[in-house]
Image (tube, grey):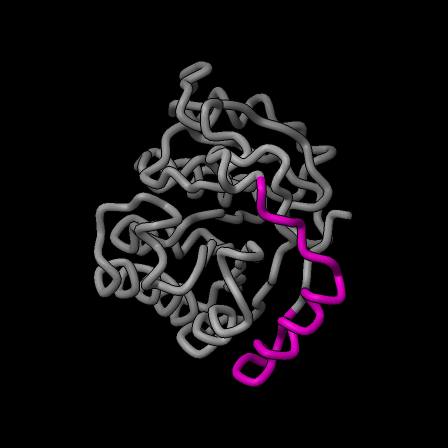
């Protein structure tokens, strides 16, 4: 596996202590990304067995496979299987654009967090992806639906970027997705990859609460995630 880092966490898997592995590479170039250079950089290569040997079983209840975009590396299938065989809970963080890989890992997953970046018609502008609106929509919705059908807990999450997005965009997302939990995350402009996005304000909690009410017209479990 090509890896950009790993860390111990108490927040990445809800209510569980986890070891997070960050795999290098991404098929997006999101304008608000905080860590694009490190995501694209290969810090070192490691086998699945070497990584799992570094995990402290006395401290770790779950393995979180993150990135970058981890589904670009098919070794995650072996990683999820081996982690599950060792008794760990397994979570995948993904942008949802590789359902053909996700389908091969679902039997080992307990939790999947899917970034729904924005309404599908804005994806090319925000992520610089190659797919058109219909293609990106079909891929992400397929990932969501496959995960739900497999009985995996599905979190969808959107980072709300004022001036680039508005309440109608959140409504458009909420109308199109189905999930166990939808999270609207607070945007932090300070380290955005695209300098233009550093000029956009950080939304206040009150604004996110209003967006939560919009999403709740369509989804039963909506939360906001604030950092400040």
Single out the residue that lies furthest toward the top: 44
- Estimate the x, y position of residue 98 in percent, counting from the top left: 29, 50
Residue located 53% across and 47% down the image = 90
Q: On the rendered structure, is 1 left or right of 60?
A: left
**Span of residues in magenta:** 199-222
Of residues 134 and 202, the one drawn nearer to the viewer in this rendering: 202
- Estimate the x, y position of residue 62 in percent, counting from the top left: 61, 44
- Estimate the x, y position of residue 68 in percent, counting from the top left: 44, 35
Residue located 48% across and 48% down the image = 92
Q: Examine the rendering and report whether any part of residue 110 can be seen.
A: no
**Screen quadrant of the N terminus:** top left
Residue 141 vs 193, above or below: the answer is below
Reply yes or no: does residue 217 show up in magenta: yes
Q: Examine the rendering and report whether any part of residue 152 can be seen.
A: yes
Of residues 201 and 7, the one drawn nearer to the viewer in this rendering: 201
- Estimate the x, y position of residue 51 in percent, counting from the top left: 51, 24
Of residues 225 and 31, the one drawn nearer to the viewer in this rendering: 31
How many numbered marks have been drawn onto this rendered protein structure?
0
Reply yes or no: does residue 147 show up in magenta: no
Q: On the rendered structure, is 201 left or right of 177?
A: right
């Amino acid at each position: 596996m090509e890896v950009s880092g790993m860390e111990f966490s108490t927040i990445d898997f809800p209510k569980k202590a986890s070891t997070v592995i960050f795999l290098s590479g991404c098929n997006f170039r999101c304008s608000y990304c905080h860590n694009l250079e490190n995501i694209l950089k290969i810090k070192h290569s490691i086998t699945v067995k070497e990584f799992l040997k570094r995990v402290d079983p006395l401290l770790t209840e779950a393995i979180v496979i993150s990135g970058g975009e981890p589904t670009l590396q098919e070794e995650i299938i072996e990683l999820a299987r081996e982690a599950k065989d060792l008794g760990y809970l397994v979570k995948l963080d993904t942008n949802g654009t590789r359902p053909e890989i996700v389908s091969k890992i679902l039997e080992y997953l307990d939790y999947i967090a899917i970034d729904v970046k924005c309404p599908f018609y804005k994806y090319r502008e925000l992520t610089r992806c190659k797919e058109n609106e219909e293609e990106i929509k079909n891929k992400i919705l397929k990932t969501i639906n496959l995960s739900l059908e497999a009985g995996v807990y599905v979190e969808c999450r959107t980072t709300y970027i004022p001036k680039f997005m508005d309440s109608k965009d959140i409504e458009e997302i909420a109308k199109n997705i189905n999930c166990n939990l939808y999270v609207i995350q607070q945007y932090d402009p300070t380290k955005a990859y695209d300098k233009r996005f550093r000029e956009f304000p950080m939304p206040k909690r009150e604004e996110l609460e209003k967006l939560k009410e919009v999403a709740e017209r369509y989804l039963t479990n909506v939360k906001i995630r604030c950092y400040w």
